[in-house]
């Protein structure tokens, strides 16, 4: 059972309403997902979440790579709700069902460059940000530059924030 109240746009705290309305407008459900409806209970949490999501647009990655990193991070965090959201996002951005499974489990997607970066993000998510030197060097040898390796952290951070909130709030699955 969820620990934090779930809000509609109408009954959310006043400081959360505009942000929650923007989220609703961007979702196909026509209502806030439980995670957003609970985050709205704290305007600070919803602002932090939307700011992290907005920052992802400033990275060097296209949406398909970003979706892969989000899914790899979600798998590392180990939250079922977050993994489902990230899996749907990955499929919407062109990953096949088999590749989505591979990104979630750490097996090959048949794209070695993506696999090495997704592996780095998954390892970081599972180990409080710690990544072995061999993993880092493999990503560099795989063709990822320092800016891209730094940008990958933005996806890790946004996903960890969301996954931890879901764990913290014990959000009921609605996706």
Image (cartoon, grey):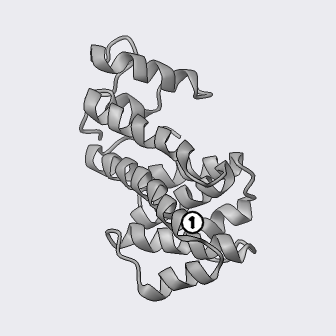
* Quadrant of the image containing the N terminus: top left
- Residue 173 in view in this figure: no
Residue 84 at x, y percent in the picture? 54, 51
Q: Find residue 85 and report its horizontal and vertical position in percent.
A: 54, 47
Q: Is residue 79 left or right of residue 113?
A: left
Q: Secondary structure at mark 1?
A: helix
Q: Residues within 10 Å of mark 1 (few under 14, many from 20)?
A: many
Residue at 64%, 65% in the rendered image: 101
Identify the residue shown where x is 46% and y is 18%. 21
Instruction: Note whether residue 66 is visible.
Output: yes
Q: Residue furthest top?
A: 10
Q: Residue at 26% of width from left, 32% of height from top?
A: 44
Q: Quadrant of residue 145 in the image? A: bottom right
Q: Specify whether 67 is left or right of 164.
A: right
- The residue singled out by tag 1 in the image is 104
x and y percent of residue 36 in the render? Answer: 41, 32
Please provide percent x and percent y for residue 79: 41, 57
Q: Measured along the vertical axis of the image, is residue 92 above or below residue 148? A: above
Looking at the image, residue 34 lies above or below residue 164: above
Q: Left or right? Give the position of 138 relative to 77.
A: right
| Count of marks placed on residues | 1
Dividing the picture into quadrants, the one containing residue 7 is top left
Residue beneath the point at 53% across and 56% down: 70
């Amino acid at each position: 059972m969820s620990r934090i109240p779930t809000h509609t746009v109408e009954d959310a705290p006043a400081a959360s309403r505009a942000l929650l309305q923007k989220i609703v407008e961007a979702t196909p459900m026509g209502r806030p997902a439980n995670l957003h409806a609970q985050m709205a209970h704290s305007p600070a949490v919803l602002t932090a979440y939307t700011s992290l999501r907005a920052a992802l647009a400033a990275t060097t990655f296209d949406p398909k790579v970003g979706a892969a990193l989000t899914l790899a991070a979600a798998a590392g965090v180990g939250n079922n709700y977050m993994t489902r959201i990230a899996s749907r996002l990955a499929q919407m951005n062109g990953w096949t069902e088999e590749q989505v499974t591979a990104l979630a489990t750490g097996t090959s997607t048949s794209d070695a460059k993506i696999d090495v970066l997704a592996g780095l993000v998954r390892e970081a998510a599972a180990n409080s940000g710690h990544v072995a030197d061999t993993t880092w060097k493999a990503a560099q040898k795989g063709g990822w530059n320092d800016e891209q390796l730094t940008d990958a952290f933005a996806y890790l951070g946004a996903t960890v924030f969301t996954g931890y909130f879901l764990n913290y709030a014990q959000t009921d699955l609605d996706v």
